[in-house]
Amino acid sequence: MQNVAQGWLVLTLTNSAFWLGVVGFAGQIPFLVVTLYGGVIADRVNKRRLLLVTQTAMMLLAFILAGFTFFHHIAVWGVALLAFGGGVAMAMNAPSYQALVPKLVKREDLTNAIALNSAQFNTSRILGPTLGGYAMAIFGMAGNFFLNGLSFLAVIWALLRIEYPEENLNRHQSLIESLRSGFAYLRSHREMYVLIWMTAFASFFGFPFITFIPYFAKVQLGLSEAGLGWLMACSGFGSVLGALTVAITGNIRHRGRILTAFGVAFFAAIIGFSYSHSFALSAGLAFCEGFSGILMISCFNVSIQHLSSDEMRGRIMSIYATSFLGLPPIGSLLAGELSRHIPTGHALAAMAGVSLLSFVAFYAFSEPLRNFD
């Protein structure tokens, strides 16, 4: 919810796709720098306590942004600074969040639990902007930020209520040594290795598109806040159907083939959306993007979690989170810079095209991916 209002706030202050890319970069660059060490820390401390600290920090930052926006004492550099602070907290939060789930269920339920977790996590990334568009139309941007701050109270309450088992925490190695052992473990498992690389290509060249959806809605399609909400609702509906597909299927078979196919469909939908000047066509492509994107990301998440051992899961998920969440800010910055020289639609379509071709190449030349079940 906050992301869509934050993007609208940046456009209101600057009407610049470049600044939209800069703020997206500021909010997500911590994932590239901090997440790896967050995974090492997650394997060395109580994950629930770490999550309580990071969730509280994000709540306070949301309330601060709401206050500054309400009183009209906010500049674009202030938005970028608060986005950076939230990104640091989220970067520390992500590995522990992902590694927490396998500790809360029995081994025989692990695959379905990971699938459900992946489905709800990624669905929220689509439904949040959908709700954010409507909340912004009803309550304004400041109200949207305030609602986001209130939502963290539910997360904190849940973390205080769960029964979390004791862990054997590894504090014998230094942070650097622990991180090196995580990369060594990843390189020794060929399936995980290629999945991480595919995640990296998708994140760098494909996922920056999400940051620019408000731009396409306002500038290319001429929509209001309510129109943006309808557009995001189509993507959200597609993501819900994709999430239900993942949850019902549970143990997904032929994952290498499936994630490649839905990845290609996801990037093709982005290319079509980038050139669309019709609301109906954009809505249909947004639905396809939401459906195929959730299936692709869920396959990545389920596969990597299932392949990892318990003692390495925090570090492996930090590498995955760095690829998944740390590279889009670099891609957003690249897309913002390209949009200064060529039309924004051309820039996003070209980047999505690179992702599409990379998925085809990975499948064609990687035997572990073709045989991955």
Image: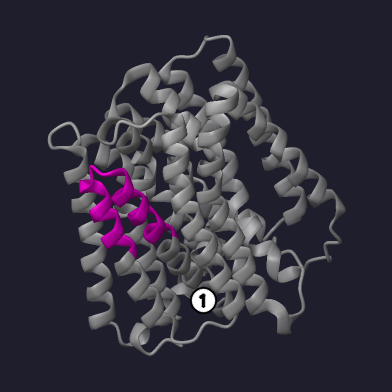
Question: Was residue 275 drawn as part of the magenta stretch in this picture?
Answer: yes
Q: Residue at x 46, y 73 (%)?
A: 186
Q: Which residues are magenta?
A: 266-290
In the image: residue 201, left or right of residue 53: left
Residue 273 screen position, x and y as percent: 27, 50
Q: Residue at x 65, y 56 (%)?
A: 97
**Vertical arrangement, residue 347 with respect to residue 58, above or below:** below
Q: Secondary structure at mark 1?
A: helix
**Vertical arrangement, residue 15 with respect to residue 49, above or below:** above
Residue 22 screen position, x and y as percent: 35, 31
Q: Amino acid at mark 1?
A: Ser
**Vertical arrangement, residue 31 with respect to residue 137, above or below:** below
**Vertical arrangement, residue 317 with respect to residue 83, above or below:** below
Q: Residue furthest front?
A: 280
In the image: residue 74, left or right of residue 23: right
Res 260 → quadrant? bottom left
Res 99 → quadrant? bottom right
Residue 121 screen position, x and y as percent: 59, 57
Number of marks drawn: 1
Q: Residue furthest left?
A: 341
Question: Was residue 19 drawn as part of the magenta stretch in this picture?
Answer: no
The answer to whether residue 311 shows anywhere in this view is no
Out of 96 and 135, give the one closest to the viewer. Answer: 135
Dot 1: few (<14), some (14–19), or many (≥20) neighbours within 10 Å?
A: many
Q: Residue under circle 1?
A: 303
Quadrant that contains the N terminus: top right
